[in-house]
Structures are given as structure tokens and as C-alpha cells.
């Protein structure tokens, strides 16, 4: 059952029309949920949502499921697309599954992240979005070189680049041949994992894994081509040292490809974006309310300033819905070009080496004495001894990958060590019933050791001062030094 919204945020609703932000200062009031209900009743808004779900109505939508929240949490249960009208009437933030019956859906998430000020992107959206322009431009330039033309969506903190590959296409078959799925995840996919009881068939699971490798390659190229960005650019949300705005980054986030396909979803265009409600603990209820409404909209040729303004105005958002389509574009043919570029890359060679080595039993025995790995610094042992929640954080996994690579560990052995820590009882709760520990360990190890091998990771922050600034130095009175590990990795590149 869908719970009813209990928000009591007052907003002006003159007559029967949708209010503009200027109307919200006074007059007759209704709760914020009523504003959203009236907004969602617009036929153009609903038509665009069904387009993004792959059809025109609940009978022909191709998305495997939808989820809806009121903004305070992510972990709502998947439901059939037929519940979309009920979710909209309940004033929800609605997302669709990446899992699709007819296509492999690609989503690249570019967003601003501030680890010291979680609400920064909402409080100053112009700055947050302007910081991302070099990364967005680089991504579109690299994809455009392969003739890819994604749907560009403007979200609350950044952009989503979305396109589809038909499951009967050559590009899909190529991805299915590339992808490697751990046996534990294969077993998960063979069971019912959607509201309809559907399973993820083998070629789809492998194609999704292969897509992660292609986007890893794309992300590395975007990093190299984003020098104009004035804050650090990271693949996933990796903490950095403080700059003028605190510990802030632009994330080219491909983390979803380290999770099972049945667990990842993306917001519908023209859905309300309700994440600012999570900032109530920081801003107070009234302060968080002032950040709303925000809607997910197609960029569709608008300037950033116009897009930011329109996404915060229900009337302007409805006008966009009446003129701009939201169907996910089929890019099966140009996707072959990006796959060909990947196959000719240094990263593809690394991936071949990564998957060529057998699993090592030594990694499991070493994991039982995680704090006493020979020649490892105390900060590494601390992370391995406190895996929950630290080994769920990309920055910690990057540190483990860097140090153990410097100690001549094979990437697959690093992945097994991390997986063994995941499989040890550290009060994980339901984490590993929803995610796959081996797949996650393999994905992040491959990502970070691949960046070392191809020199995408410049290793600038592999030092104790940076580790302290990132707030990952947990051992007091530590007499170790991370610089020698950096020197070992740099010397390896020279030879």
C-alpha cells in the first residue's frame, strides 16, 4: 500500500491553477502534497512519464518496476508500473528501474557533491551546476565522438545522460560477450527479482556487467578531459581534501554498475525531486521546505540558468512537458562505436589481465588477519578491521586498492580480500540480501586498480596529510608514512 503524504508545508494555490514560486509567499494555503497532486494531474506530465517508462500506459510500459518515496529514504519496495497513478496521487518522487523488458538502459549520473555541506547544491544551484559544465561538456564530447546522443536530464544536483540499447541489437550482443558476472550474482539473477516474478536472464545480466566496463572506460576519458573543472572530478563519490567550498567534488558516478541490476533505478522526467527533505535535520523543516519544489526536466537546449529556474516552477515545468518528449533514445548503432573504442584501449587490456588470473585462496587466509598484512600501514589495517561502514565507502576501497597494489597484490586477490570482509559478521543487517558482496568487491577493485594501471589515477592524494584532510586517518600516534607506497606505484609506471 502507498502511504499518504502528511506534509503540512503551506503553499499558495490561487484559483484552480498551479502556483509559481512568486505565488507561494501568501494568500490561501494548501499543503505541498496538494500542489504536487494538482501538478501531477496534468495530462502532459503523465504522458511524458509513460514515455520514459517505455510505453503509453500501464499495459505496454517496458520498465520492470517503479519505486516511489516522499524524499526521506531510498529503500522503497519495487512495484509494477501500473501503480504510477497511485504514486502520483500520493505526491511521490517516482523512479523507474534500469531493468527493462526490451532494452538495456544506460544512465550516467553527473552531480555535485559536498561532504561538508550536504545541502550546498540546493542552496546555491547556480554555482553547483556551473562547476559541472566542464564535466558535462567532456562527457557529451566523448559520447558525441561515437555519435551517441543521449537524453540529458537536469536533476536536483546535476545531470543524467540516458539512452537505450535494444536487446536484439549487435551492440547488446557485444556487451553480453564482454561482461563477467560473479557466480553469486548469477544465482541471484536466476531467482524472481521483480514484482511480476520475472528473472534477469543471463545475457541481460552479462550485458549490464559489460556496460559497466564501457562506462569505466568512458569515465576515465572524461577525467582526462575535464581539466577546466575548478573542483576535483571523481568516479563515484570519493571524499577529497577541502577547497574553497569545503570537501567538494563533481562526481561522474558509475557506482550503480557495482550493484545488481534489479536494485538500481532512475527518476522519471517531470517527477518531483524530494531529496531536500533529507536536509530537515540540517536546515529545519521550514528551511528544507523553502528549497522545494524541484522537478526533474529534460535540458532540451535551455541555458543552465533557464533550466534551474524552470525546474523550480511547476507552471514552467508543465509547459516543457507539453513540448518536449521524454522517450529514452535508442542508440544501439552508435553504441557499437563506443564499444570499438573501448576494445582498442589500454583499459580493455587491463580488464583481460584482471579476469585471466584464478581466484587465490591466500586472499581468504590473509583476510582472517586483516590487521597484520605484511608491510601495510596501520590505516589500511584499521579499514579492514572496521569494514562496516568503511568498506562501503569508495574512498576507503580506493585506499585499500592503492596500498595493496603497491605491495604487489594481484587485483583479483584484493577483490577477494574485500569480499571476505563483507562476508564476515560485522552487523551488516540486510545489506548483503540486497547487494552482492562479491560483485561489489570485484567492481570497485577493478575500477581503482584499473585507474592505477592506466595512470588515470594520478595518486596526488596518496599521502598522510591528504588522508587526514579526507578524514580517513583513524589511527592515533601512527608512525607510518604513505609516501613510500605512492613512490612504489610511480616507480612501477617508469619501469
Image (cartoon, rainbow, N blue to C red):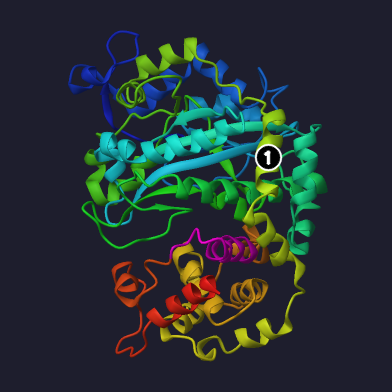
Residue at coordinates 49% horizontally, 76% vertically from top-left? 491
As drawn, 493 above or below 285: below
Residue at coordinates 19% horizontally, 17% vertically from top-left? 27
In the image, is 224 to the left or to the right of 443?
Answer: left
In the image, is 478 to the left or to the right of 148?
Answer: left
Q: Locate residue 243, reporting x and y percent.
A: 24, 56
* Residue 446 counted in the magenta span: yes
In the rendered image, the quadrant that contains the N terminus is top right
The residue lying toward the viewer, choosing from 103 and 135, is 135
As drawn, 470 above or below 304: below
As drawn, 184 above or below 144: below
Residue at coordinates 34% horizontally, 43% vertically from top-left? 228
Q: Locate residue 298, reporting x and y percent.
A: 47, 24
Image quarter for residue 461?
A: bottom left
Query: Which range is magenta?
Result: 441-458
Can you see residue 198?
A: no
Element at label 1: loop
The residue lying toward the viewer, choosing from 163 and 322, is 163
Q: Which residue is mark 1?
A: 99
Can you see residue 111?
A: yes
The residue lying toward the viewer, choosing from 30 and 199, is 199
**Hey, which residue is sitting farthest front in the picture?**
495
Q: Locate residue 212, reporting x and y percent.
A: 64, 49
Q: Locate residue 178, reporting x and y percent.
A: 75, 51
In the image, is 58 to the left or to the right of 279?
Answer: right
Main SS category, magenta section: helix
Total marks shown come to 1
Residue at coordinates 59% horizontally, 81% vertically from top-left? 408
In the rendered image, the quadrant that contains the C terminus is bottom right
As drawn, 140 above or below 396: above
In the image, is 324 to the left or to the right of 178?
Answer: left
Amino acid at each position: 500500500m502507498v502511504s499518504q503524504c502528511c506534509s503540512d508545508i503551506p503553499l499558495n494555490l490561487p484559483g484552480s491553477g498551479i502556483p509559481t514560486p512568486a505565488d507561494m509567499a501568501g494568500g490561501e494555503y494548501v499543503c505541498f502534497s496538494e500542489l504536487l497532486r494538482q501538478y501531477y494531474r496534468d495530462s502532459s506530465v503523465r504522458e511524458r512519464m509513460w514515455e520514459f517508462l517505455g510505453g503509453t500506459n500501464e499495459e505496454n510500459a517496458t520498465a520492470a518496476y517503479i519505486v516511489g518515496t516522499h524524499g526521506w529514504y531510498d529503500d522503497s519496495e519495487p512495484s509494477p508500473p501500473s501503480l504510477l497513478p497511485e504514486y502520483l496521487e500520493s505526491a511521490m518522487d517516482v523512479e523507474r528501474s534500469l531493468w527493462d523488458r526490451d532494452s538495456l538502459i544506460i544512465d550516467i549520473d553527473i552531480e555535485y557533491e559536498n561532504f561538508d555541506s550536504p545541502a550546498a547544491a540546493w542552496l546555491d544551484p547556480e554555482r553547483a551546476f556551473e562547476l559541472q559544465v566542464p564535466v558535462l561538456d567532456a562527457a557529451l564530447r566523448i559520447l558525441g565522438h561515437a555519435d551517441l546522443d543521449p537524453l540529458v536530464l537536469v536533476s536536483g544536483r546535476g545531470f543524467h545522460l540516458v539512452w537505450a540499447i535494444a536487446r536484439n541489437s549487435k551492440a547488446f550482443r557485444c556487451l553480453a560477450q564482454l561482461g563477467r558476472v560473479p557466480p553469486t550474482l548469477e544465482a541471484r539473477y536466476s531467482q524472481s527479482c521483480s514484482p511480476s516474478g520475472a528473472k534477469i536472464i543471463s545475457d541481460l545480466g552479462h550485458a549490464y556487467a559489460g556496460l559497466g566496463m564501457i562506462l569505466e572506460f568512458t569515465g576515465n576519458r572524461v577525467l582526462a578531459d575535464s581539466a577546466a573543472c575548478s573542483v576535483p572530478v571523481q568516479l563515484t563519490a570519493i571524499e577529497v581534501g577541502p577547497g574553497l567550498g569545503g570537501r567538494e567534488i563533481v562526481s561522474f558516478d558509475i557506482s550503480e554498475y557495482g550493484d545488481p541490476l534489479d536494485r538500481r533505478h532512475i527518476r522519471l522526467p517531470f517527477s518531483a525531486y524530494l531529496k531536500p527533505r533529507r536536509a530537515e535535520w540540517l536546515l529545519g523543516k521550514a528551511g528544507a521546505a523553502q528549497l522545494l519544489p524541484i522537478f526533474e526536466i529534460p535540458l532540451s537546449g535551455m541555458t543552465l540558468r533557464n533550466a534551474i529556474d524552470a525546474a523550480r516552477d511547476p507552471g514552467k515545468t508543465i509547459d516543457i512537458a507539453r513540448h518536449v518528449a521524454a522517450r529514452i533514445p535508442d542508440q544501439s548503432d552508435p553504441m557499437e562505436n563506443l564499444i570499438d573504442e573501448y576494445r582498442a584501449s589500454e583499459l580493455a587490456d587491463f580488464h583481460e589481465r584482471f579476469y585471466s588470473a584464478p581466484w587465490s585462496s591466500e586472499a581468504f587466509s590473509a583476510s582472517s588477519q586483516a590487521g597484520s598484512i605484511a608491510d601495510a600501514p596501520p590505516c589500511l589495517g584499521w579499514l579492514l578491521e572496521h569494514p562496516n561502514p568503511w568498506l562501503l565507502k569508495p574512498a576507503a576501497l580506493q585506499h585499500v586498492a592503492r596500498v595493496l597494489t603497491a605491495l604487489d597484490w594481484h587485483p583479483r586477490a584484493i577483490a577477494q580480500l574485500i569480499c571476505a570482509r563483507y562476508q564476515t559478521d560485522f552487523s551488516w543487517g540486510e545489506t548483503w540480501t540486497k547487494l552482492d558482496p562479491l560483485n561489489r568487491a570485484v567492481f570497485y577493485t577493478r575500477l581503482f586498480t584499473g585507474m592505477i594501471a592506466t595512470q588515470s589515477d594520478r595518486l596526488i592524494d596518496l599521502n598522510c596529510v591528504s588522508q587526514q584532510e579526507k578524514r580517513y586517518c583513524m589511527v592515533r600516534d601512527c608512525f607510518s608514512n604513505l609516501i613510500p607506497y605512492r613512490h612504489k606505484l610511480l616507480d612501477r609506471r617508469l619501469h
